[in-house]
Structure formats: C-alpha cells, structure tokens
Image: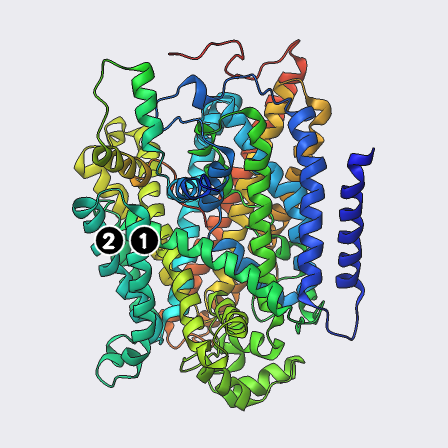
Amino acid sequence: MSALIPRLRRIGAMMVGMPDYDAYLAHMRRHHPERTPMDRTRFFRERQEARYGGRNGGKCC
Amino acid sequence: MTRHIPWILIAILGAAALSVVALSRGEAVNALWIVVAAVSSFLVAYRYYALFIGRTVMRLEDGRPTPAIRRADGLDYVATDRVVLFGHHFAAIAGAGPLVGPVLAAQMGYLPGTIWIIAGVVLAGAVQDFMVLFISMRRDGKSLGELIRMEMGQVAGTIALFGAFMIMVIILAVLALIVVKALAESPWGMFTVAATVPLAMLMGAYTRWIRPGRIGEVSLIGLAGLLAAIVYGQSVAQSPYWGPLFTFTPLQLCWILVGYGAVASVLPVWLLLAPRDYLSTFLKIGAIAALAVGIVIMAPPLKMHAVTQFVNGNGPVWSGGLFPFLFITIACGAVSGFHALIASGTTPKLIAREGDAPIIGYGAMLMEAFVAIMALVGASILDPGVYFTMNSPAAVIGTGPASAAAAVTAMGFPIAPEVIAQTARDVGEHTIISRTGGAPTLAVAMAEIFSHVAGGPAMKAFWYHFAILFEALFILTAVDAGTRAGRFMLQDLIGLAVPGFKQTASFLPGLVATVLTVAAWGFFLYQGVTDPLGGVNTLWPVFGISNQMLAAIALMLATAVLFRMKQDRYAWVTVLPAVWLLICTLSAGWLKLFSADPKVGFLAHAARFGTAADRGEILAPAMSMAEMRQIIFNDRVDAALVALFLAVVLSVLFFTIRTCLSARRAAGPTATEIPARLVPAE
C-alpha cells in the first residue's frame, strides 16, 4: 500500500513526460561516476525543454 | 483448457450485449449494454489477438535489449515500469479526436458507430499502434518518417513526411475550429478559457522559480484556479460591463486564435505550454474517469435511434453516406494515423522489455476506443431533437427556437421550441442552436451525466462549462504543441532544398517556418469559420481522410516490414486493415473530388457556384459576389488538398508493393533491425 502513492506520483509525472529524477541519479552514479549529474531543478528544466520544444511531434488529436 | 473458460464467458457476455444493442427495436436500450459489449470485446481481443500478434507475428523476445536498455541515459531512454508507461502513452494519444468523431457520427444512430469503433480498433487501430511501436522499438526508437526511409527508401520517407505535415495542418485547423464553435457568443466559456492563460503563466512562474519541479502541487493550485474561473464565469457573463467584453463572433475568435497560436508557439515552453499541459492532461484523465463512473452509476437509456435515415447520406451534421464516410468521421477511437507519430516518438524509448509492448501499444489504443464509446453514448443519451438542433447548420434550421424546432421536427425528431430554450437556460448559454463541432453536444451530455451523479439540475450549467473548458484546454495545448512540431517538420522539409533552413537554433528560419505553419492552419480555420455550412461539415471529412490515410501509410510500412522479416505468411494482420483503409479513404477522397452532389463533391460545389457567378447570380449563403468567389476558391483549395493526399497515399502504396516484392525475392530477412546480440553500450 505504501508503494501506491509513489507509484501514482510517477504515473502522474510520466503522463506529462517527466521521468524519475532518482532513476536518473542512479543511472549517472552507475555508468558515469566521473560526471556531476544535474541537480533536481536543472533536470526538471532540461526535461521540460526536451518534451515541449517541438521535437517530439506534439500531442495527438 | 480451463484457463480459457473465463475468456469464453467474457466473449459470450460481449456477444449477448452486442446482440441486445443491435437487435432491440422499439424500446430504449440501456447505454450499459454498449459499454459491456465494448469492454468484453476489448478484453478478448487483447487476450487472444494482441498476444497472437506479439508472440507469433512479431516474435517479441523478452531477452532482447530495448532502446531503453541499450541506450539508457536516464533522460530520453529510461526503462520504465509498464503501468507508468501505459499512463504516459495513453495521455499522449488520447485527445479531442475520440470525443468529437463519435458525437458527429451519432447522426446515423448509435449502432453503426458502435460497431465500427469496436471492429475498427480491434482489427485496425490497435494493430497499427502496436506494429509501429514494435518497429520503432527494434530500431532505436526512430520516428515514423525515419522508419519509412529506412525500410522503403528516401523518396517514400520524404513523401510521408510531407503528408504528415499537411495532416498536422488540417488537424490544427479542425481543432481550432471546434474551439471557435464552442466559445463563440459564449462569454462564460470564453472567460474561463481566457483565464487559463494568466493562470498557466502563474503556474509556470511557480515551477520555474518558487518550487521547481513540483508538478503535482502546482497542478492542484491550477485546478483550484480553474474551478474558481468556472464559478466566477457565470457572474462575468451576466455582468452588463464584462459580459459583452467576453462575447466574440466566430470571426473575431478565429483571429484571436491565430494570433494566440503564433505568439504562444514562440514563448518559452515553461511559461505557458508546459503548465497548461499539466492542467489539461490531469483534467482530461480525471474527466474521462469521471465520465466512465458517471455512465455506470446513471445507466442512462439511449434516446437516439439505433439507425437513422441519414445512413443514406443527406444528414445535416455531415454529408455523405455510411460508406465510406462513417469510417472517416470516426477516425480517432477506431483507428488514428496520428498515433503512428506518437508510437514512434517517446514511448519506444521507454519500454523496459519487449513483452510490455502489447499492453502499451495495443492496450492503450483499446482504452482510447473506450473513450470513443463513452462519447458515442454521451451523444446518444440526449434527446435526438436536442442533438440535431445543436449539430445542424444554421443554413438548414435557422437561428431561432421556432424555426429550429420546426426544421428538426420535420426531420423526424420531434422537439418543442420551449425545450430548446430551456436546454440553453439549463446549461447557462444564450442558445444551443447550431452549436456544431461536437464539443458543445458532448458538454451537454456530460452535464446531464455529472449533474445526475453530483449536484442535481442546479449544477448543470457548472458542469457544462467544466466540460467545455476541459475540451478547450487540451485543444489549445494541442494547437500550441502542434504548431511547434509543424515548424520543425517544415524546417526539415524546406531543409531538403535549402540546407541552411534546417538549423533549428537560428532565429530567422524558425520564425519563417512558424509563420508559415500558423498561416497554413489559419487559412483553413478562416475558411471553416466563414463557411456558411458551418465549417465542420467541410473540414471534418478532410481531416478524417487525411488521418486515416496516415494510418494506411503506417500499416503499409508495417506490411513492408513483415515482408522484410520474412513473416509474410502473417502479413494479413496488417494487409487487411490497410486495404480496408485504402478502400475507405480512396473512395471518400474520390467522392470529395468528383461526386456530382454539390454537398459532397468540392468540384461540383465549385461548378455550381461558378455557373451562378457567371450569370451574375448570388447563391445563398453567399451575400456578395466577393463571397461567391471566396467559396469557389475555397472549394478548389480543398479539392487540391484532397488530391494531394490521394497522391501521397498512392505513391506510398507503390513503394510498399515494390518493397514487398523485392523482399520476397530476397533469400533471407532484409529488415534493418538492430541486431539482438548487440550488447548494451555502457
């Protein structure tokens, strides 16, 4: 039950194209430990730009 | 064997429900039968057909690394939990289309639409989404244009890209037209929609500087603002000072929208587009869920006839007979080509295992079909008299309750003028006559359902404007996002001839491409708004034809890929729906061009007005010679556009056949998949 709320939050975030920051951090730690990962705010802004910049083909009818 | 028993029971239930829907005559059928028929068909189709396609036709391998594994970067390529991904994909594919098409199709009764949605999604729509997702997933998440280029050659790819751009233009124009139709002369609706702009900007500032990244929090704030806007909208509309300030004619709204589209698409995304997308996405999901619950609780009887006399054509909502026009009127919900762009967009980059593809690709489309079924139910629980009063053009039924009631009663759907006036008062509008475009009709139906569950008749006006706001909100988001996407498509296309144009970072090409995109959809919007037959009548079929043609293109790509995989013995899975869509769209396109009936054929219509103009005559609804010339010009542009779509789809057909033939001659598979054994790049 306690897992339900975070999961709903992830579903909600992903519905508007925002991936999980912790997953990103984990990925960076595992594969690129030498690089400094983006902080939460920069990650948010970067993803926002990537989703809405227009390169993603827009929304459906 | 025992594991099949529950599915057999579901199938029997579905068949029973469908026969109740199809065979009842004379007595009102409960809407829940349609819902049960649809849901059981979808469950069985998923369990057997989707899994058959996945296992046998595509041969999905769970061990094979997906793009999310191979190219994992924590950003674009992220292995995502399939429930989370389902939400992402569904939110991206479900828009206004599945809500509007079925409402318009209800003019033929609820039965034809129900059958087409169920059969169409199972055999065509969901297959298309699933196949494109699969093809893209095996090719690093490449986009539809790139996939066609890889599998069918450069020329085919460019033609398809061009077709996709034109389809985008038509979609934007039609969506904007629906907003115009819903908000014209409606100060309450206009105020609430206008209020979302400063509201979204506040939300944007909040997520930018105050609490970056708190999407849930800011969405709740936004929702509170929206509800306040709906509540205050009533006082604004009734105020002698503010009311007129928010009352616009369709033509004024057309220019406002064009201006909005141009400005909004060059603003930074965090300011307006992103926050409004949060609002519209969550509102959309919430409203769809509430509608489903509402229909189940209310269990309304269907008041629309199962089949009306308009199956033969001559319907007031849109012209043309059941075949082929029903199959292009309900595009999204049954089969939507636009999904091919989504299924080859972000989703294939997020799939964790190949085994998740059926539920994402096939399952999410079934869910959209369910939305379409609910929209059809919504339109069909209204009194048919109200339905035809709202959806017939003013040229047919006039503008007053008396003339509308007389005209609609003469069609065979009796309604009293008082009922028309009372329905308008109930929902807090000046009039419901000729509120075409589908959105207002659905809003009346949603108000009916929601007020039954919560608030009673006193809340009808609130729920009506809530429904209008919810539809307008995500249409405006789509207009904004679509203009940006169109801009990049156009830059790519022009870049083929003028390489410097491709530089998306430089200012001038971007501006030129944006202006061209807005001008393109603005032209069709203007044409639709000034169209005396109401615009929806003309533009919706063109949109349907183009959307279904894109679906045909996607299914042809899928066919070519199956041949190149040497899986041609299963090619019927995509050939069947592709052929059906080609038959529907080519014959619909042909009729739109060459039908002798001026209500259907663009050229016949132009000829009729041309001969009259030569005689110096002015035909209604034109008021002057200049308007006559405008109508003739519009007809010719529409005809050229349809001819262009026909040319695009026929040339892709040519490339498909060529690819399939050469794949058959080849000894082994020739599909350009990323090899399975490739180890993920660390």
Q: Residue furthest right?
A: B1
* Quarter of the image where the C terminus of chain B is located: top left
Can you give x and y, in whole percent of width and height, for residue B310 in the image? 67, 69
The Cα–Cα distance between marks 1 and 2, rounded to whole angstroms, is 8 Å
Q: Residue at coordinates 69% horizontally, 28% vertically from top-left?
A: B571
Contact, CB < 8 Å: mark 1 with mark 2?
yes
Looking at the picture, tell me which residue is in the foreground, B257 or B14.
Answer: B14
Q: Earlier in the sequence, mark 1 or mark 2?
A: 2
Query: Is any atom of residue B557 visible in this view?
Result: no
Dot 1 alpha-carbon crowd within 10 angstroms: few under 14, some 14 to 19, many 20 or more: many
Q: Residue at coordinates 53% horizontally, 81% vertically from top-left?
A: B397
Tell me if residue B668 comes above or below residue B333 in the rendering: above
Q: Amino acid at mark 2?
A: Met
Q: What is the secondary structure assignment of the residue under circle 1?
A: helix
Q: Amino acid at mark 1?
A: Ser
Numbered disc 2: what chain? Answer: B
- Residue B599, disc: none
Which residue corresponds to mark 1?
A: B219
Q: Are marks 1 and 2 on the same chain?
A: yes
- Residue B203, disc: 2
Looking at the picture, tell me which residue is in the foreground, B296 or B522.
Answer: B296
Query: Is any atom of residue B52 visible in this view?
Result: yes
Is B274 positioned to the left or the right of B593 in the image? left
Q: Residue at coordinates 43% horizontally, 51% vertically from top-left?
A: B170
Q: Quadrant of residue B76?
A: top left
Can you give x and y, in whole percent of width and height, for residue B414 in the image? 64, 84
